[in-house]
Amino acid sequence: MPMRAALSLLREHGIQATPQRIAVVRHVLRTHEHPSADEVWANVRRSCPTVSRATVYNTLNLLVEKGLLRSQVLREGTLVFDPYVAPHHHFVDEETGRIYDIPWGAVTVTGHRSLKGFDVREHEVVMRGRKRTK
């Protein structure tokens, strides 16, 4: 993500732009991965060595609050950040730990509207297994 785009995005959402926040946004919103906060911190430190772990965590949480990221526990005991905020499902490769986005229409969930005593506001399917190579 170009610097200008990151700066503009932060301003559009009422977030004060600092070099550290810009670096976090540039990394996390251009990735197709589902990084943990520590993974974001390690990557951002390459281009912005002064960024602290606390700044990365706070920035990621602010981006979630503003609707620019989603946070989910998709890997065992690890909170990951997803830059794709439109409805979709996930597949977790248990061998590699890689998380794949699955298009919303690829999986059909039925019966959730008829659950008695539950008001379902959203749902998502998380599948686990092994990605085939061929």
Image: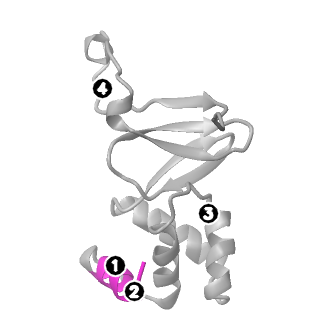
State the residue position of label 2.
17
Q: Which mark is residue 120?
A: 4
Q: Earlier in the sequence, mark 1 or mark 3?
A: 1
Instruction: Classify residue 1 by image quadrant.
Output: bottom left
Helix, strand or loop at label 4? It is loop
Q: CA distance from mark 4 to mark 1?
A: 32 Å
Q: Residue at x 55, y 29 (%)?
A: 127
Is 16 magenta? The answer is no
> In the image shown, does 110 or 95 lie closer to the viewer?
95
> In the image shown, does 111 or 129 lie closer to the viewer?
129
Cβ–Cβ under 8 Å for marks 1 and 2 = yes
State the residue position of label 1.
10
Q: How many marks?
A: 4
Helix, strand or loop at label 1? It is helix
Q: Earlier in the sequence, mark 1 or mark 2?
A: 1
Q: Earlier in the sequence, mark 2 or mark 4?
A: 2
User: For mark 3, does the 10 Å Cα neighbourhood hold few (<14), some (14 to 19), or many (20 or more) residues?
Assistant: many
Cβ–Cβ under 8 Å for marks 4 and 1 = no
Q: Earlier in the sequence, mark 2 or mark 3?
A: 2
State the residue position of label 3.
37
Helix, strand or loop at label 2? It is loop
- Please state the horizontal and vertical placement of residue 101, each as a whole percent of the image: 47, 44
- Please state the horizontal and vertical placement of residue 36, each as a whole percent of the image: 62, 58
